[in-house]
Amino acid sequence: MRISSNLFKLEDYWAVWLGFFLLLGGLTLFTGFSKPDNMDSRFSEINRSLDLAASQAPYKTIEYYQAVDQKNGIQARKEAVGSFVARFVAKPQSWETNPIDSFYTSAAEPGESDLAEYEEVTAELSRSLNAAKTAHDKAQRAGFKDKSLNGQAETAIDDWYEAQTISSGLKARLGKKEFNIVPGLIALTVLIAVLFAFGAHFMGKDVKGFLLSFPCLMALAIFSYFMGEQETMKHLGFGYPAWAIITGMLIANTVGTPNWIKPSLETEYYIKTGLVLLGGELLFSKILAIGLPGLFVAWLVTPTVLIATYIFGQKILKIPSKTLNIVVSADMSVCGTSAAIAAASACKAKNEELTLSIGLSLLFTAVMMIILPVVIKASGMPDILGGAWIGGTLDSSGAVAAAGAFLSQEALYVAATIKMIQNMMIGAIALGIAIYWSTVVEKGTGVEVGWAEIWNRFPKFILGFIGASVVFSLLYYSMGPDAGSALIENGVIRGMTAPLRDWFFCLAFGSIGLATNFRELAPYFKGGKPLILYGCGQCLNLTLTLIMAYIMFYVVFPGITENI
């Protein structure tokens, strides 16, 4: 009865329910009402053209690229229903000097400079196409036996395809239709508020306060997207995660976060739901690819750092409270608050010790989530390695997602997956601490060790993350790569769930900023053994994780890295 009743009372479960509700809703809309006409027959015809083009030359011909473009153009999100849904979840658009362009643009005739640029690009496209055809004809007349001619043809065709890509992008920009995302933003605000308020009701939270304050949090998210889409900011890599967190922190540490807005600052609720949606984006084969080296990064480094930090605290720093020592060590090495709570429960730490540990975690996480991506970019570190480093070292899932998003989509995938793998250790860590405390530290005190405690501390939303990945992977592969790409990847995911996931992440980042008050965390700057313990442990964690990530992703499993 307890488990069944918790299904509608715990945040983790509601993240799963909401995530799957949106995923199933997206499947219904895009596979049932937005399937491209004659999709299967069109794919069959294009595939025959691709096979024919591939058999005609030892390189990719003009006909091959044209067939690929035709195939890539078959997408459920471009159909009537798909386009409507995509507009409904749209974020503010790119803008350069006029802020209104981010929300509304009228259909205007291109100017003289635009037409001149288009004519120039079109002329270059025509020239490169003629050059590609001439080079191909020469290679063909030689029976494709002259490697030099084959190479020249391949280069000329690549130049033509690049010119065509530029021409297509310019044509799309000049032919941009009128759009107005304001009505969609209003409707989206209402939808998200109702969805999360529904779960908040069953969890016994302040639903009225949530509904009244949520529009303000959504306004912060819209502002963050708006600023992140400014061309200069985009060029500098200063996207919506940075704007959401920093703007929230500025409010919290100047005028202060109003009490009435706090009911909507459900950081973990938003981020966990977003991560369930992210699970649908990660095909299971990709999770296994990332997970194989990720297992070594998370499951070898994490316990090593935890044990080393605890020994350091006892033998070197001589921290009087063993419970404080182990809670800080678990918080820093595993995954922040959740691990700290699990460790505190296992060793029966004092509430003050748990609060101190969480405060240190918030402090270091707030700083590291901004500094770490900057260091990665400045050093020229590959995004895959940077994502693995972030996923294995930052304490909370929200911070991992934010820092990963600073780098790239690939970095976000790797970072989030490694963090999921690391989160799975919470139950094992809690069990290990409980056993150690009952048999060594407090022998004979009767600390209860059982599967119920492990299950209580296990982050349930991980099951939703994995389940979404399995379901969507099975659907994708059962449909085949062509239909799967058109309906799943370029339908449900890119047309609906991925934009929603980004909105949820943005709400979480804004909540993190508004909840981070450095005045309240100031005591942890004053030094002391817990601060030294956390700092030294995190340095060890950063070093070992980076070394292990490099070894696993670039030495032991380089093939996996290339396919991420």
Image (spheres, rainbow, N blue to C red):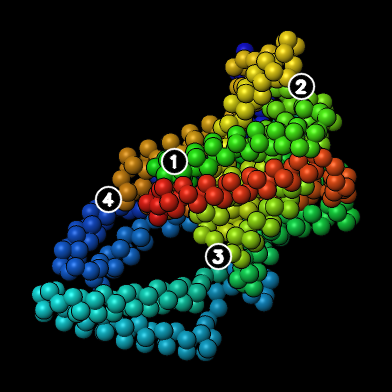
Name the residue carrying label 3: 380
Total numbered badges shown on the rendered structure? 4
Percent position of residue 94, x then y = 60, 68
User: In the structure shown, which secondary structural element does the residue marked by tag 3 occupy?
Assistant: loop
- Marks 3/2: CA–CA distance: 44 Å
Of pointers 2 and 4, the one earlier in the residue sequence: 4
On screen, residue 45 above or below 120: above
- Marks 1/2: CA–CA distance: 35 Å
Contact between marks 2 and 4 (CB within 8 A): the answer is no
- Crowd class of label 3 (few under 14; some 14 to 19; many from 20; radius 10 Å): few
Of pointers 3 and 4, the one earlier in the residue sequence: 4
Task: Using the rendered image of the protein, determine whether residue 340 is visible from the camera's viewpoint.
Answer: no
Q: Amino acid at mark 2?
A: Lys
Q: Nearer the viewer, residue 143 or 303?
A: 303
- On the rendered structure, is 232 left or right of 27? right
Instruction: Say which mark, if any, is on residue 292.
Output: 1
Residue, x 35% and y 58% (percent of image)? Answer: 74
Of pointers 3 and 2, the one earlier in the residue sequence: 2
On screen, residue 267 above or below 11: below
